[in-house]
Every structure is written in structure tokens, then in C-alpha cells.
Image (tube, rainbow, N blue to C red):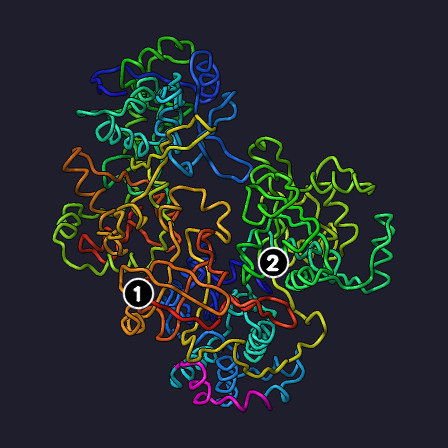
Amino acid sequence: MGNAKTNMPEYFLKADDLQALLSALMASARVIAPVRSDWEEVLFEPIVNGEQATFEYENAVVSPKDFLLPQTEVLARYRRVGKSYQVEAPIEAPPQVIAGIRSCDLSAVQIWDEAIGSGEYPDPYYLARRRGTTFISIACPTVFENHFCAVLDTGPTLQSGFDLHLTAIEGGYAAQVGSDAGLRLVTEQCRFFRPSAPSELQQREQAARDAVAQFAARFDIAAVQRALSSGADLDAIGDAASRCQDCGGCLFVCPTCTCFDVRDYPTGENTGERLRTWDTCAYAGFTRMAGGANPSASRDVRVRRRLMHKLVYRLESEGLLGCVGCGRCIAACLGNISLVDLLARLGGQEKSRVG
Amino acid sequence: MTNSIDDIAAAPCIFAIGCNAPEAHPLIGWRVRTAKDRGAVLIVADPRCTQLAEWADLHLQLYPGTDIALLNALMHVIISEGMHRPDFIEQRTEGFDQMWQVVSNYPPDKAAAITGVPEQQIIEAARMMGRADRVCTIYTLGITEHTVGTHNVMAVADLAMTLGSVGKPAAGVNPLRGQNNVQGSCDMGALPNVFSGYQSVTDAAVRAKFEKAWGAALPGEVGLTLPDMLIEARQGNLKAMYIVGEDIMMSDPNTKHVRQALESLDFLVCQEIFLSSTCELADVVFPAGSFAEKDGTFTNTERRVQLVRRAISSPGQARPDWQIICALGQALGMRMSYSHPSEIMDEVASLTPIYGGIRHNRLGTDGLQWPCPDESHPGTPVLHREKFTRGLGKFAPVEHEPPAETPDDEYPLMLSTGRMLFHYNAGTMTRRTPILQREFPRNFVQINPADAERLGVRRTGKARVTTRRGSLVVDAQVTDRLKEGVIWMPFHFVESPANVLTNDVFCPIARTAEYKVCAAKVEPA
């Protein structure tokens, strides 16, 4: 993805051909797609056959973040030789296609690109995987429970940021090319694509309008930011803090979170691994000092910090909001904290019905 | 549980006693939160101001070991004010009048003096329960881990019957079991007095059934419970132990006593996923596969038998428990050859009426709740709907008795112990998980600010906690979540294990130890 191209061509892909396309792509890349489990949950998994993939789904339980920023990753392996250490830092980044990713989750990738994939010290592990990844995203036909992407302009469909973007229309998909990688994919797999007819372009645009129209209300993000930044005690924050049970689930399922912890693990008497694992600022230990002092010991502080980071600090440092409106934190919360209601309250509305 | 987990979310009134669900049972904490968000009334009885207590409409902060006085007083108010359910009591129970003879001696002012809960709060809690259409009672180890643990449970059941809240949805008497399969272990007869499905070993017909199935003679006497085994081992009467998946050096009270018992054995075999403190004393250790490395079933707190499927293969020589047990049985000359755990489940079903209809191929995504007597039975979400197991529910009145140790001049504080969100029991798994370890790397003692000030314990300092059995230096956590005179510690930390302090006295009926209260003193360290 990356460079959003204007006037890129559009194609039509028959519904029946999508799974066959994925099978064909496996010749040169690992293909990751949404798969419905025996428990009726949809998760992104590497597939061995296009028929495993499903596109009839709301959203995956978690985003495909694991395939770019693994939950656990070996950064280096070390071996003690005499008095010194031999260190190797393997970066495993096989070419991969992530297919069926929703607009919100692909918008999260743009946040990672800004937060850890660029600047003075880009993350080489992330960058290697990112450069080897092609995204085939898919527009949402309607608003799903807890989703509020339309409020944040991260969905239900996308204007840019994708390699190939699919929108369901009659008989198949409108396929928009968004990058050189997308164009290459269509060219190499040309037997599955034909140029779109004008009526198909109209259908795609109509589908996008229909989906957006289903998002009923909007909340005022600027008002939320003002309330959060004021530093005042806010009842909405206090209420969320009283509900929070410290499980960290909201942030482990968040597609935009990038925080991690690094530890060395011995694997033998003279060998070991340096592992990086996901971490979350929902935990009090995240900022506890060695002596025990903790600037964010209280849940109020941690709930506010979570919102500040996502809605204020990210915008200041990366130019993008740190929330894509996927609603996973709402589904995961054991305290029934609804980010939609919380933002509505902070934005001055008592209750907002979004979707 | 008499009822199902989802019943909690639908309950109009929840009474939680000795139960810290948001930390010890987070998914049940979520159901309580959901019930509250739907308008339920929540009453919490706990010596600590836990998060559940913060959510409560009323928090009854009682002294540890005074549950019966509180429960009897609640019944006293409910009955005196005519809020009990005469129809239910008449049709479904017996012994109500005898119960009242005991309970009538517990007016709320008397209970207030014993429990430390203000009289008015006891009356208000009783009225909240009495006004509700039905009450869903949940309790955990705060009720059972006492010398009067069984009596505590009886009093909880008496209260539920007084309120007519048994045998219907969104109500019931619901002990929350703390481990994924502790219910299953009990169901399978990992108890000294029963075969699988609670069939008595003293019943000759039952014994004959199992002897025929297994082709072996079976003893007809009740065996030893864990505390009795340790006593018998120290006296030289018990020679060998085979301990599977339990780190009793961490989880049993009075570690010194446990160590002496294990060291008195001629032979100790342990079966574990990591080399635990108990394994270090063993002659032989069998490496076992973890939950993620085996096929089979777990039976959860709502009696739901759930299918588990192997996700990863075992490292090194580790094997699933069932394979180790079968290999051991074969070596001892017992025919135990199964190709898959589903065959073991078939055998369980053939010998165990409450599991009679449970087969792996029926468990699917949702499992089945026992009793499930035959293959067409859909399982049982709510127990005791038409009648109790014994017919009529029997009121079992109980008197308040103080804990085995109460504060005195030398040990003026009450120590209670328990669990926290970030660590699980003996810490075998969670203490090896770095981010969980970071959250709570060291043991600590919670102490009320007034006690801390009087004793000279500083807010960020260390404290020495001493009981008649041992002494530990841990971080002090000064907090007003505890009453004056009560201190609290978790028990997850192998390097400063709280169970060197706890009292190895136990309930004479259930043989569960009194982890929840003993006398202690605290000094700055």
C-alpha cells in the first residue's frame, strides 16, 4: 500500500473467483485470510486453500496485527562463547498477502506506519514485514454492532491506503487498485479480473453511500479532545474507571496499540533469546518505577491516559487519531465500558446512538 | 452451582458473600456487572472493600469468620418482617421451625456486635433481599475456608430456601469453583469417599459395579482427605504419595507441617508441568502436558462438561496426564489401554449415572451440563427444580462459632489470605509469565492506615508478619480497604509463601483448612 494513486483503474472480480484468486496467490506468498472456526468465531489465519477463507463476516475477533507485529517475537538470539557473546538478529519476513481485512483494520496499519515504521528510528522488524505485505481490503456493506468508523473516517470504505480494495456489488466485487503492488497483483492474476463497466462503478459508489447512511449519529471529537485535555475531573472517566477490572482486554484487542515489553529468556546454559511481547498501559505495572512509585497507580489516570493517547497524543505526534472505531474494546470489556457512550458523554452528549 | 453462569446476569438481586469475582472469577464478575447494569440490586459481604464491594448497593464489611452470625441475622430480619416465602417453605422444605429456634437468637443488634457490621445495614440488606422477586447467591472460598466452612454453606442454603430462591432460573446457591476442572475432578471421584458421580465406596452394589467393570477388587472403606494424609504421613502411617498437578508446599496451610509430612514419606511421586516446590521433594517426577497439550474435557463451575482439544504438542518427554496414569496402571498390572480420551469418557458414561449421556461427539461448541442421564437428555441448567435430591430441602440451623484462633495480646490482628487477578494459585504458570510477574513481583500485606500508624509501618516500607507457625517480611500496602484489626495477604509467592503463616486447622466435616483467618502480629521491618 502506501502511495495513494489517483486515477488507478478499477476491475470486476466475480464472487466465485475470489477464493480461487487466493489459491493462485499462494504460489508466491503466504496468504492470510479470515477463517470461521468450529466455535463460529472469525480469525485471521494463514490458509492453505482459498476455500478456507470467508468473506461473509462482521469483523474478526482480533485484527491481523499479529502478522505484522507478532504478539511474541524473537528479536535476537545470543550464545556465550568464552567471555563474549555471539548475537544474531534474524528478521523473518516472508512475502504475504493479507486478504479480507476491513477498512478499520487497514486504517490501523497507517497508524503503525507513522508510529513505528517511519521517523528517525523505524522498527526494522516491522518494516521488513510491512514491505513484504500486500493488502486486499474489503468494504463493509453495513454498520456492525459497536462499530463507529464513519465518525472517524476510517470506514466503512476507504479512499486510499490499500493495495486492492473490494466492494461487494451485484455478482461479485468492484476491485479498486490503490498502489503499484495492487496493480502488479491484478496484472499477474489478470484471468480473474476484467475492467469495470460504468454501471459497476456507480454500484460501488452507491454501496458506499448506503453503508455510510446507516451510521445514525456522530459525536464531536473536537469536544471530546477539549474535555480530555482540560484536565478536569470527569464523571464519565470516573464511571469507566470504576468498571475497569484491569484485564487489559481492551488494548490487547485494539488494532492500533503498538506498546511492547522486551525480556531475555535463557534457552540453555549458554544460550538465550531476546523476546518482545505485547504490553498494555491498562496495567498499573506499565509505569511503575523500580522503587514502587507509580504516576498512574489509579484507574482514573489509566483510563484517561488511554483516551488521551488515542485521541490527543497520537494526533499530535502522528497526525492521525489512534482509534479506528472497530468497537473491539467494547466487545471485550468485562466491565461493559462502551467507548461509544464514553465519547458521547465526553463530547457533551449524554448518549449517542452510532449505528 | 445449582444454576448456570448466565443466570447471574439475569438475576434481579445478587448476594455475594466471601467472593471477589472481578479478581478471582473475572468472567463471572462480568455477569455481575451486567446484572447491575440491567438494574439488579447487589449486596456484598466481604471483610475487604473489593471492587465487587465498590459496585454494591450495600457492602457488609464483616470480620473474617463471622459469616454465620450475619447469615442468621439476615434470616432473622427476613422472617420477623414476614418477607420469607411460606409457600416454598411449606411445599419444598422441612425443618423451618427448628431453624427458627436457632435463628431467633440472632437479632441484628447481636449480630452487629459479632460481625462489626452496623445493625441498620443488616436490616437494610435483609429488606433488599426480601423485596426482590428472587435472590441469586454466589459464594467462594471466603465461605468454605473456615473451621466452620460446612456450617457456613448450610447457613447460605438456609437463607436461599427462606427466600424461596432455589430451583428457579436467575436464583440459586452458587459456589464459584476456582479452577477450570476442579468440578470435574470431584465428579470423577478424586475424593476419598466416592467413585465417579458421587457414588459411595461404602455401597456394596456400587462397588460391585466398578469391580466388574475394572476386573479388580476395590476397598470398601472411606480413604483419607489431604489434611489427614499429611497427619498420617507425619505419624509414619502413610508411606507413599502420588501428587498430580498440585503444589501442596505452596497451597496447603502451615508449610512447615507440609514439609515434615512429605519428608516423612518413604516414596513421593509428583506429576507436574513445571518443577514446583513440591516436586523438589519428590523421588520421581512425571512431566505432564499442560491444558493446551491434551484432548479431553474440563467440567466447569456450572457443571458444564466442555471439550478441550490439543493446540500444541508437548515439549520434551511430557505427556498428557491420562497417558501417564494409564502407563502407570499397565506397569502395575492393570489393563488400561485407551486410544483416545473419548474412550475414557464412554467408560465414565457407562458407570456414572449423572454423566450417562455425555459423549465427546455430543459436546460440540457448548458442552453439556450434568445431570445428563442418557444420550437424548439435553443437560440440566438449573438443579432442584421440582424437588431436592433428598426430596424436601432440609433447613440445617447452625450456631456462630469463633475461628480456631482469635486475636490476643501477643497476636492482636486477624490475618486473612486470598487471591488476586494477576496470579493464579501456586503461581506455577503465572509467576513464569513476565508481564504478570511485573504487575505483582513480590508478596505484600494489606493493612489499615490506623494499624500501620500505631505499629510504625510505613506506606512504602516493609513489614514483618508473624503467626504461631512462621514469619515473613513483605511489602506493606497501607489501605483503608480493610477494617482496623484485619490484615490480608495473597499466597502466590513461592519466595515468601503466605501459607507458612496460615493455620492448619480444618473444618471437621469437609476437611477444608482455615486459610481465611488466624491470629497474627505485624512489626515494621
| Tag 2: amino acid | Gln
Q: Which residue is mark 2?
A: B260
x then y, percent, for residue A352? 26, 53
In magenta, the rendered stretch is B101-117
Q: Note whether residue B218 is visible.
A: yes
The percent position of residue A1, horizontal first and vertical second, equals: 28, 20
- Element under disc 1: strand
Q: Quadrant of residue B186?
A: bottom right
Q: Chain of mark 1?
A: B
**Whether residue A174 is visible:** no
Residue that badge 1 annotates: B478
Q: Main secondary structure of the magenta part?
A: helix
Apparent side of residue B351 relative to residue B272 in the rendered image (left or right): right
Out of B96 and A166, give the one closest to the viewer. B96
Report the front residue among B30 and B185: B185
Q: Residue at x 58, y 61 (%)?
A: B257
Query: Does the magenta portion include B38?
Result: no
